[in-house]
Image (cartoon, rainbow, N blue to C red):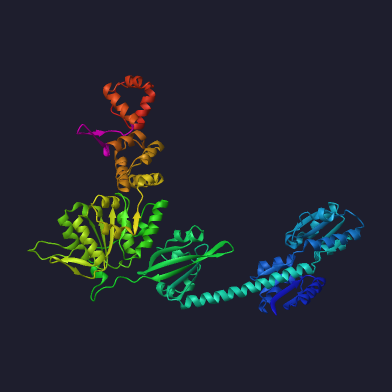
Amino acid sequence: MERIAILLPRQTILEYANAVLEKEGTKVQILKVVENSSAVSEAKAAVEAGARVIIARGLQATLIKDDINVPVVEMPITVREIGFMILKARNMLKKNHPSIGIIAFENMFESLDELDELFDFELHFYKLTELEETRDLVSQAIKDGVDLIIGGVKTNQIAFEIGFPSLFMETGEESIRKALQMAVHILELAELEKQNKAQLDTLLDTSFSGIIKINAYQEIVAVNRVIEQLLGRSSAEVIGFPIDKVFDGIDAEGIDGILSGREELYSTSFSIKNQLLMVIGAPIQYDGHYSGAILTCHKVRSAERGEGQSSGAKLMNGHNAPRNFFHILRESGEMKRCIKQARSYAISRNPVLIYGETGTEKDILAEAIHNNSPQKGGPFMAVNVSCLSPKEQKEVLFGFGDENKKKQKGTLEAAEFGTVFIEEVDCLSLECQYLLFKAVHDRLFWEQNSMTKRVLSVRLIAAAGKELSYLVKQGNFREDLYFYLSALKISLPPLRKEPEEIRRFTGLYLDKYNTAYSRYVEISEAALKIMEEYFWEGNLLQLESFCERLVLAAHRRKAEEGMVQNLLQELYPVIREENGISQTVRSQNPEALRIEMLLERCKGRRTEVAEAMNISTTTLWRKMKRYGIGGWDCN
């Protein structure tokens, strides 16, 4: 017996339903005629008796759907059934082209389109929104000159009272059969969903990995016991919440990539209460749409420590990394791609090579990689080798000392179970390159004039401002170390390639220093354009320093292009070699250079300069303002 309740407004429709059930060989739980006023209470009783789908029509279907949380299948009258009613009306009226009014709720029909042309009658449709409108709509139909009204029980009662021709809107076998097939299909889908849920529950409960299921809105639908244990919270406490609110540090933008179909696979890492997890995500696709995703979380084992060693002891000297991925300020698409790469590389124990100019947040990225790696419990030690001599490089990295002195631990040993971040690795001497490769790749350390095998769990992150492959070709960087470092490579984009970021950070830094110094300095659009076009070799570091100086140096509330141009030339002059003599070039623009030369030749007389350039003095003044050329007071 199918757990279906069929509730109908009239006995004749019930007879049709019985005929359909007999032909289909289907038995339903409840089949009865009900009044409109009792439709909801009858539906509730049917659900309590075990019905899981209700079939109803018109007003009764609407009332039940509004009040009960079970599937309701409506029985819209088919075009064929309406055609029979029109033929019946034509026979009653003895007219070939009658005018017929239909008064009903909109959900009563499959379609009313082109019915009048198809069955040769004049159609007037009066849409009911509530039953109390019926009498008014009957009156309106009569005023409109209809010959006959088709409607439900209430419509026919009113028409009968006033003696106006009417027909009851019958639901035939075709409508009932379609509704019954839909109800059976819904029950089959519900059963399939129940089986799928049981399978998912079994998978969740037996998996040794953490599993998180989310919907298309990144809301948590289910988690397994592994995730519950890691969180220290039950599934009931997290289901329904956005995933990034429950799992701090998870890459929500990356998840959006697979939910939108931009990416087929998602991988990242994040921590739950100091347990590092590698996350693999795959979308749930149904009928061409992405309805959610399954995230599988694998625990990443931390670097093992010797007896008596603890992360607390290692971090007591202050060698920690306080920053993570969310501390990175840049928001461009290319920078987000680099962060995504870094999250993936973090769970590896192999070296990471970061390319980037000064001020591109290499140091923050290195700390973030450490904090999402198996080495996160150990120290993070940064060494900039560019300012060290080859001898000092050996001493700092490997602990080499004078023969008469006791050897001190080098950075590689001091950072055991942690990470060493070597900045400007391109400045490392060839000897140190060899020793570094042997130490991190072969676990061999130079001691007492020979190589000694030593197991040392340390992660290497290197940063360079120059492309190491060029140095390899020049013989200034070892091939073995280059190939070992470059497998996990991240290239951070310079700020000049992201003018929208220059604009954004200029606004942020001006706000910062206006607040710090209680000033109010704005920047004009033309000046911003110059900022966007400038090279910014020092990237964020240089841009922030420049903005501070701009706020302090401004004599007006708005910094114009001339002031910005002048300040750039003052702070970062271009040096040009001519005949072995270094000269400061005030501007790199050819037109600006010509104006400066003419001003010098004409001793600042702008009228003569304008004549020489065949332009007006006003145009010359505008160009001087644009290029920031000042200091000439003569006319």
Question: Does residue 406 sit above or below 431 in this rendering?
Answer: below
Q: Could you say where residue 144 lies in the image, as x and y percent from the top left?
A: 83, 51
Q: Could you say where residue 434 lies in the image, as x and y percent from the top left?
A: 21, 60
Say which of 425 and 43 sits in front. Answer: 425
Q: Could you say where residue 84 lies in the image, as x and y percent from the top left?
A: 84, 62
Magenta-tinted stretch: 570-589
Residue at position x 53%, y 76% in the image = 199
Whether 562 is among the magenta residues is: no
Say which of 153 and 50 sits in front. Answer: 50
Q: Pick out the residue farthest to the right.
A: 94
- Along the horizontal axis of the image, is 423 left or right of 179? left
Q: Is residue 317 visible?
A: no
Say which of 446 and 395 sits in front. Answer: 446
Rendering quarter of residue 102: bottom right
Q: Could you say where residue 183 lies in the image, as x and y percent from the top left?
A: 69, 71
Whether 574 is among the magenta residues is: yes
Total labels drawn: 0
- Along the horizontal axis of the image, is 379 left or right of 192? left
Residue at position x 28%, y 57% in the image = 482
Residue at position x 35%, y 63% in the image = 346
Q: Is residue 104 visible?
A: yes
- Quarter of the image with the C terminus is top left
Question: Does residue 253 sit above or below 537 in this rendering?
Answer: below
Residue at position x 60%, y 74% in the image = 192
